[in-house]
Image (tube, helix red, strand yellow):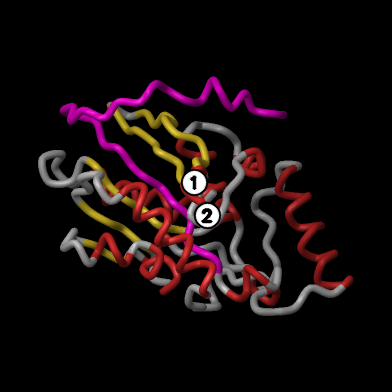
Amino acid sequence: MTLNLHSLCLPPNSSKTKGLKKFYIVRHGETEYNRKGMVQGSGINAPLNDTGQQQANAFYNRYKDIAFDKIYVSNLIRTEQSVQQFIDLGIPFEALEDLREISWGKQEGVAFTPETSTVYQQTTKRWSEGEVNVRIEGGETPVEVAERQQKAFDYMLSKPDEEEQTILVCIHGRAIRILLCWMLNYPLSYMDNFPHNNLGLYVVNHAGDQYSIEVFNEVSHLS
């Protein structure tokens, strides 16, 4: 199934509204593993490279005037580095392990060869066919990632609106795809319908018990 991307997006709402939480969800900047096309997952704790830092600078310059109440990152350094300039403004931040990237098991940190590429492609194909309890050896399933993400966002949602209403969240590529599926009540098999770029931005609103997308993988700040 191909999603109607326009139907997922709502008109911007920049006002402070009681009962509304606005999440600015961004993928981390480029690392050398990204540049080389190697899988990092949650087992490789690589820093940003020069390109990744430039992407982080561009994101900061575009969004530095947003009044973020809180910043959440994963426990992997590339996420914190990507939003460090916001942290330096004094905005409170917290690292949540449940926001980490999916574990790719034995694929992590390994150069792609015909054999390893086949394992990766076969696994993601099975996910797209609905076999979302399948894992690469030593890794996680999309279902397991979704379950821990839900715990992390339940924790964020438990915070009073007057303390945390506009929230910056920096996480990971596959994690974003899984996250948007369960937020929008799509099967996890649809995850590849949600593109992601290094420092690409999704804005997701939460009101009542529903999430909705306001901004879809915004990357104009990178050009």
Neighbourhood count class around disc 1 (C-alpha, 10 Å): few under 14, some 14–19, many 20 upward: many
Tag 2's secondary structure? helix
Is residue 148 found left or right of 66 in the rendered image?
Answer: right
Could you give the CA–CA distance between mark 1 and mark 2, rounded to whole angstroms?
Answer: 6 Å
Q: Which residue is mark 1?
A: 179
Q: Which residue is mark 2?
A: 175
Look at the image and say whether residue 10 sits in the magenta stretch: yes
User: Camera-side residue: 74 or 97?
Assistant: 74
Q: Assess whether mark 2 and mark 1 are in contact (beta carbons under 8 angstroms).
A: yes
Q: Amino acid at mark 2?
A: Ala
Q: Position of residue 124 (x, y in %)?
A: 73, 53
Q: Position of residue 73 (x, y in %)?
A: 35, 62
Tell me the amino acid under the disc marked 1. Leu
Name the residue rendered at 40%, 64% in the picture.
Answer: 82
Residue range highlighted in magenta: 1-30
Up-down: is 160 above or below 142?
above
Where the N terminus falls, by quadrant?
Answer: top right
Residue sitting at the far left: 162
**What main secondary structure does the magenta stretch of the protein show?**
loop
Q: Residue at the spot x=34%, y=33% of the render?
A: 205
Q: Residue at x 62, y 68 (%)?
A: 34
User: Residue 12, relative to residue 112: is it above or below?
Assistant: above
Residue 156 location, x and y as percent?
26, 49
Q: Taking 217 as reference, is 155 above or below it?
A: below
